[in-house]
Amino acid sequence: MGLSAEEVVGKTLHGLFPDEIADRQVQFYRQALDGEKSVFEETYQGQRYRVQTLPVRDEGGEVTAGMAVARNITDRWRQRKELRQRKEKVRALYETADRLLRASSREEVGDALIEVTQETLGHEGVSVRLIEGGELVATHVAESTLEFMPERPDFRVDGESAVAEIYRAGETLVVEDLEDEDLDLSHDYGDLRSVVAVPMGKHGLFAVTSPEPEAIGEFDAHLIEVLARYAALVLGRLEREENMLRAKEAADRARQEAERSRRKAEEAARLKSSMLANMSHEIRTPLTSILGFAEAIEEETQGLEPPVKTGDIEPLGKFAGLIQRSGQRLMETLTGVLNLSRLESGEMNLSRSVEEHYDSEAM
């Protein structure tokens, strides 16, 4: 325990140790003088000891003295303490990481990373950079970070800054002491000494910082990487959901446009039908009259000598026949157009007999 024999001999516990330690150990020494064994642990000057107190008996079995044996177990004690702290951190991490996994926006992801890091790992310096317009934008910075380093600028993804190089490399950067590292110091880092920076896939960069050297241990660095992977998964999910939403909106717009086009087509068809119906009325009526009068003239002129004024004038009956045949041809054309319109609108079905009729006409 770092004490010489001269310092110990003739002293009481209170003469050797602080009252807090002496008061706690007196009971075990008294138990040894009462014939009982005891085992306890004590911390003294930063070291941990396992102490045994036991009685010393004579040949007759009577207690004549007490004895204490102390063993330095500092390394094992620190290992146990570190293991316990690690277990507590892992348990706390998985208990609190749920808020990160349930984040419904990029804003919530950044807030959750800061909260979880500070609450479970105990590191106050936290910053989150997300990709926006080809830049690594510092979207979330814990207020405590600005107490030891100035506000950081945004960096181009394709630039030469240390931040951009870490992002492009896709690998974790661990700096135990900034003063010992050969890094780009073209920007003011203030009192920053240690940092762990982890890329979040293609989405950005997550950094935990401290003004103390070697403040972020290897185990904490591993947990920070776990948080970064969680964040990358959530940001990827949010990106996919956003893409799906945009695709759905585009599909909805396309359906709406198709519906508008359908209505326009139906309106055009209606107008066409209306026009053809009017054409049927407006053309058929006078055409019927023309055909009727032409037929009447032809019948009246049959057997009569044509009134001839010059040798170039055709007989009147022949003229009437030409008018009638031409009018009939025009009537058949009009009927064909109207029937085609009715076929297109579904008001009329084409039967096989009609097809054979038209085939025979073509032959």
Image (cartoon, rainbow, N blue to C red):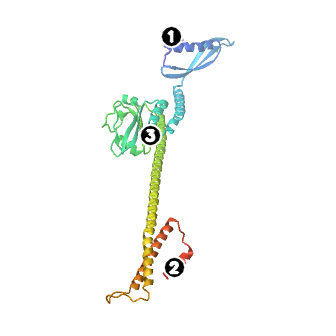
Indicate which disc residue 106 carries.
3
Front label number (3 vs 2): 2
Q: Position of residue 218 (x, y in %)?
A: 46, 35
The residue type indicated by label 1 comes to: Gly
Q: Are marks 2 and 1 in contact (CB under 8 Å)?
A: no
Q: Position of residue 155 (x, y in %)?
A: 34, 41
Q: Earlier in the sequence, mark 3 or mark 1?
A: 1
- As displayed, is residue 207 above or below residue 6? below
Q: Position of residue 108 (x, y in %)?
A: 46, 37
User: Foreground: 5 or 50?
Assistant: 50
The residue type indicated by label 3 comes to: Arg
Q: CA distance from mark 3 to mark 2?
A: 70 Å
Residue that badge 1 annotates:
15
Is 345 positioned to the left or the right of 62 in the image? Answer: left
Task: Residue at 65% x, 15% y: name it.
Answer: 36
Task: Residue at 52% x, 14% y: name it.
Answer: 20
- As displayed, is residue 7 above or below residue 157? above
Q: Position of residue 203 (x, y in %)?
A: 42, 43
Is 182 positioned to the left or the right of 299 in the image? Answer: left
Front label number (3 vs 1): 3
User: Foreground: 58 or 299?
Assistant: 299
Residue 212 seen in render: no
Identify the secondary structure beneath mark 3.
helix
Instruction: Please identify the residue farthest to the left as the structure is shown.
Output: 186
The residue type indicated by label 2 comes to: Asp
Q: Quadrant of residue 159?
A: top left
Indicate which disc residue 359 carries.
2
